[in-house]
Amino acid sequence: MTKVLLYNIKKDYDIEKFKDLKPIPIDRTSNDKYKLFDIIRDIYQEKEDNKKPSITGNLVDKGDTVVLVMPQDKAAPKDRLIKPQVMTIRELIDKNTTCISTSLENFENCIKSLKNPPDLIITDSKVFLDVYKLKPEESRLTSFSVLMSGFKGDVSYFMESVKVLDHEIDNILIAEVCTHPPIEEDIGTVKIPKMLKSKYPDVNIDFARGEDFPDIEKYDLIIECGSCMFNRASVISRVKKCKEKAIPMTNYGITIAYLKGILDKIDYQV
C-alpha cells in the first residue's frame, strides 16, 4: 500500500486529489507529537517489510489454509526439519494462515479431515506426482524447491530454461549446494539422474557440490538444488554467469515437475 503523509495542511485543502495514494492527514493544531512519530514509524516499517523477499509471495493470503507435505529422508537432521521447511512454516505463521504439516502417507487422510480443500499445497519435490494425483482439484500446488527458486534465484529464467529438455541434449551439470554426503536415494545424485537417463539414455551428467561451480561452457543445462544454504546474491551471481554465456539454468523442483509432466499444473511466485 502506498501512503502519503500530509503534514501541516489547511482545513480547506483539496485532499481529494491524493485519495488514490491513501493520504494520512495530520492535524497541525495537535500537540501530540508522539502520534506523528508513530505514524512515521509505521510507514517506515511498511516500506521495509515490502522490500523483504518472500517465499510464498502472493500465493497465500491471510486466513488461507496451507498443507505442507514433508516426507523426511535419512539426510534430514534428527529431531529437526530442514531449512526450507522451517523458513516456509515461519512465513506462513507470520502471514496468519492455517498451516498443516503431514507426511505423504497421511496426506489423503489429512485432506479428508478438512472441511474445505486447502488453498495451497506445498510438497517436497520428490513426491510431486504422488501429491498431484491425490490433491483436490481446487487446491493449488507447488513445492519447497520451486518456492526457493523465486526466493533465492530467478524463477522466470528457471521455468524457461527447463524447456531445453524438450530437445536432445548432451551434457548436464547437477550442482548441489549442500555438502552433506549423498544418501542412497539422494535426489540430486540418484533420483533426478535416473529420470533424466530414462528420457535421454546417452546424456552425460556431471556433479558439483558446495561452492564448486566449474567451467560451465560445455553444458546444455545446469540444474541446481533449492540453494537453501546459499544467500540470494550467490544464486543470482550464478544465474548471471549462465545468462552471459547463454546457458540454461533451472533447479531440482522445476526439473522434477517437468519430467513428471506437471510443470504447467504447478504454481510459483515471481
Image: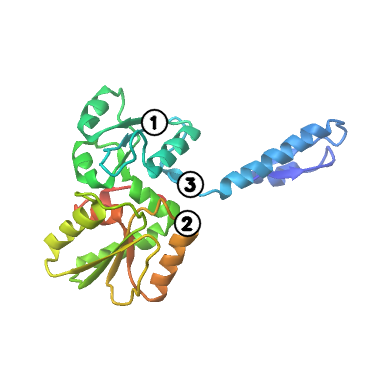
- Residue 194's x, y, as percent? 16, 57
* Image quarter of the N terminus: top right
Determine the secondary structure under disc 1: strand
Is 228 situated above or below 122? below
Q: Residue at x 33, y 77 (%)?
A: 217
> CB atoms at circles 1 and 2 under 8 Å apart?
no
Three-letter code, disc 2: Arg
Q: Residue at x 71, y 42 (%)?
A: 16
- Residue 59's x, y, as percent? 41, 43
Three-letter code, disc 3: Ser
Nearer the observer, disc 1 or disc 2?
A: 2
Q: Is residue 268 visible?
A: no
Determine the secondary structure under disc 2: helix
- Of mark 2 and mark 3, the one earlier in the sequence is 3
- Between the C-alphas of marks 1 and 2, the distance is 25 Å
- Residue 190's x, y, as percent? 19, 55
Residue hosting label 1: 99
- Between the C-alphas of marks 2 and 3, the distance is 12 Å
Is 124 situated above or below 201? above
Q: How many marks?
A: 3
Q: What is the quadrant of residue 207 in the picture?
A: bottom left
> CB atoms at circles 3 and 1 under 8 Å apart?
no
- Between the C-alphas of marks 3 and 1, the distance is 16 Å
Three-letter code, disc 1: Cys
Q: How is the image coloured?
A: rainbow
Tag on residue 133?
none
Q: Is residue 48 visible?
A: yes
| Relative horizontal placement of residue 2, taking residue 207 as reference (left or right) | right
Residue hosting label 3: 54
Q: Residue at x 68, y 38 (%)?
A: 42
Residue hosting label 2: 232
Q: Residues within 10 Å of mark 2 (few under 14, many from 20)?
A: some
